[in-house]
Amino acid sequence: MSEASKYKRVILKLSGESFCRERESGISMTEVAQISQQIKDIVETGVELAIVCGGGNILRGKQFSAVSAAIHPSTAHYMGMLATVINALALQDALENEGVPTRVQSAIRMEGVAEPFIRRRCIRHLEKGRVVILAAGTGSPFVTTDTAAALRARELGADVLLKATKVDGVYSEDPEKNLHAVRYTDISFRDVLKQNLQVMDAQAIHHCMEHEIPIHVFNFGVPGNILRAIKGKKIGTVVHA
């Protein structure tokens, strides 16, 4: 048994970028396998874990609708939601290959490949030690997967929302554009909104702020970082009340 988790129940938001190699698209099962190994380490701490998948490695509804007048924006967003289901199924098989019991629940009904999202059933899976992968966002267009993660954190009574990204925290400015940008170790929800920092969209921030669910932002690309975040280690940035 690994060192105990700081939290009992956790929502992990995985961006679509975590499913592919840097500056590429599609799915790299090598990358997915690496994430699966990190998730296995988390499960061994005894934490109850639900994962919300992004789908940007396959298709971003917002960007797709912007370049194609033939596709209605709402249709493009539904396409993006279906992309998250593809990622969820890939992650499920990779996790089960590691011996981790897993369930996929989708906000868009597709019983042939996933359970529908039902709050009580999801909680029961978590209590039984299963990892639940939550796909298709909220099932509604024009809602980001970040907001979906915040909503699920509220519904499931999560202690923290972990946002695994390609950067190592929240910066005062885009660190790729300004080398002098300052990384925060912790910052309040109100300061994030006031400074318009690109942590999550404002709706997601408001959901977490109202229910005092901290958001821990860190770089998933560093091996072991997800486990460090679970244990409450000082990595990345913590956004809190």
Image: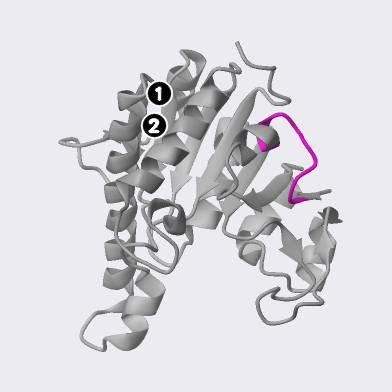
- Is residue 169 toward the left or the right of residue 43 in the image? right
Q: Residue furthest left?
A: 112
- At 40% from the left edge and 47% from the top edge, which residue is drawn? 31
Q: Report the magenta stretch's main SS.
A: loop
Quadrant of the image occupied by residue 63: bottom left
Work out whether 30 lies above or below 36. below
- Label 2: element kind: loop
Which mark, residue 196? none
Hey, what amino acid is under mark 2?
Ile
Hey, what amino acid is under mark 1?
Arg
Quadrant of the image occupied by residue 235: top right
- Examine the rendering and report whether any part of residue 85 can be seen: yes
Pick the quarter of the image with the N terminus. Answer: top right
Residue to which mark 1 is pinned: 121
Residue to which mark 2 is pinned: 118
- Crowding near the residue tagged with mark 2, few <14, some 14–19, many ≥20 C-alpha atoms within 10 Å: few
- At 19% from the left edge and 35% from the top edge, which residue is drawn? 111
- At 43% from the left edge and 67% from the top edge, which residue is drawn? 142
The span shown in magenta is 229-237
Do the residues bearing badges 2 and 1 touch, measured as CB atoms within 8 Å?
A: yes
- Label 1: element kind: helix
